[in-house]
């Protein structure tokens, strides 16, 4: 950069841009993925074999792999090849346990309760996030199954699915029994740069049964109800 003062408050600025040598990506090698499918890692890359080597996109790609949070460590190196304008990229990952099992029990005013759950952030080695749990008490049974499949069928869109079910049986004490089921499906994708859309549709079904000992208000609510919402 050259600066020349041409007046008391005016400066001429001359900027010479010298283009550096261009390098191209000959090959991208991935090591250490014994469980994780290679496509899960390659889907995070913003550069591909044959592309010019862009350090900004390369660093973003490595950061995107780390952000999956299914690897203990991620390292990379750019190595020379026999061709002076071509480079090879080596990406080494170290996998870590990505699942957990939870089990709990408690005692409260509503009686004893137990809970069992399973979470997995890399189901089948495909980067699928899975969360399922079930809880049981003397009157209530609840369960949930939640799944996120990233980059579903290579569409750059996440598939989101959630299923919930619960049943409360108070026929002997209060004369009613309810059964609730909800299922939702949606997606998440980048519509524009840093602008994400997450459309979702949800179906809710509730069924109420009563006995002769139920209150008048509960008897009026007896029946089955279906509600559909979208966002």
Image (cartoon, rainbow, N blue to C red):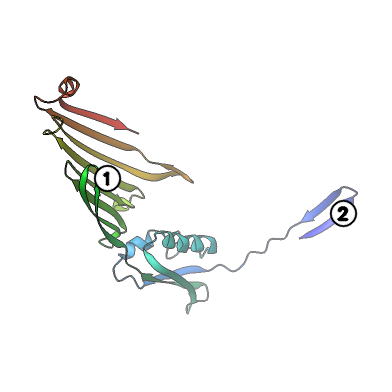
Q: Position of residue 78 (x, y in %)?
A: 49, 73
Left or right: 229 in relation to 53: left
Tell me the quarter of the image containing the N terminus.
bottom right
Residue at figure coordinates x 16%, y 23% from the top left: 215
Q: Position of residue 205 (x, y in %)?
A: 20, 32
Residue at figure coordinates x 46%, y 61% from the top left: 61
Question: Disc 2 and disc 1: Cα gap in Å?
Answer: 65 Å
Q: Nearer the viewer, mark 2 or mark 1?
A: 1
The dot on residue 5 is 2
The dot on residue 170 is none
Left or right: 206 in relation to 8: left
Left or right: 89 in relation to 100: right
Q: Position of residue 187 (x, y in %)?
A: 33, 43
Residue at figure coordinates x 29%, y 31% from the top left: 229
Above/below status of 221 relative to 119: above
- Residue linked to disc 1: 161
Disc 2 crowd rating (10 Å Cα; few below 14, some 14-19, many 20+) is: few
Q: Nearer the viewer, residue 45 or 116?
A: 116
Left or right: 155 in relation to 137: right
**Which residue, as the protein is rendered here, is positioned at the far right?**
8
**Which residue, as the protein is rendered here, is positioned at the far bottom?**
82
**Is disc 1 placed on a helix, strand or loop?**
strand
User: Decide: marks 2, 1 in contact (CB < 8 A)?
Assistant: no
**Is disc 2 placed on a helix, strand or loop?**
strand
Tell me the quarter of the image containing the C terminus.
top left
Q: Quadrant of residue 170?
A: top left
Q: Nearer the viewer, residue 175 or 2?
A: 175
Mark 1 or mark 2, which is nearer the start of the sequence? 2
Q: Nearer the viewer, residue 184 or 224?
A: 224
């Amino acid at each position: 950069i050259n600066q020349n003062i041409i007046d008391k408050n005016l400066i001429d600025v001359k900027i010479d841009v010298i283009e550096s040598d261009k390098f191209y990506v000959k090959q991208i090698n991935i090591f250490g993925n014994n469980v994780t499918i290679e496509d899960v890692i390659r889907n995070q890359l913003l550069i591909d074999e044959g592309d010019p080597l862009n350090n900004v996109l390369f660093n973003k790609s490595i950061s995107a792999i780390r952000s999956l949070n299914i690897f203990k460590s991620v390292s990379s190196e750019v190595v020379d090849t026999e061709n002076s304008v071509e480079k090879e990229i080596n990406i080494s990952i170290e996998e870590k346990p990505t699942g957990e099992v939870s089990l709990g029990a408690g005692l409260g005013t509503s009686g004893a309760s137990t809970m069992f759950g399973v979470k997995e952030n890399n189901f089948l080695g495909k980067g699928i996030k899975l969360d399922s749990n079930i809880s049981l008490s003397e009157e209530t049974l609840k369960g949930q199954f939640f799944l996120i499949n990233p980059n579903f069928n290579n569409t750059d869109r996440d598939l989101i699915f959630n299923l919930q079910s619960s049943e409360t049986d108070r026929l002997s004490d209060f004369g009613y029994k309810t059964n609730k089921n909800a299922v939702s499906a949606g997606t998440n994708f980048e519509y524009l740069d840093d602008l994400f859309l997450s459309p979702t549709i949800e179906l809710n079904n509730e069924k109420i049964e009563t006995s002769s000992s139920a209150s008048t208000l509960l008897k009026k609510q007896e029946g089955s109800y279906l509600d559909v919402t979208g966002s």
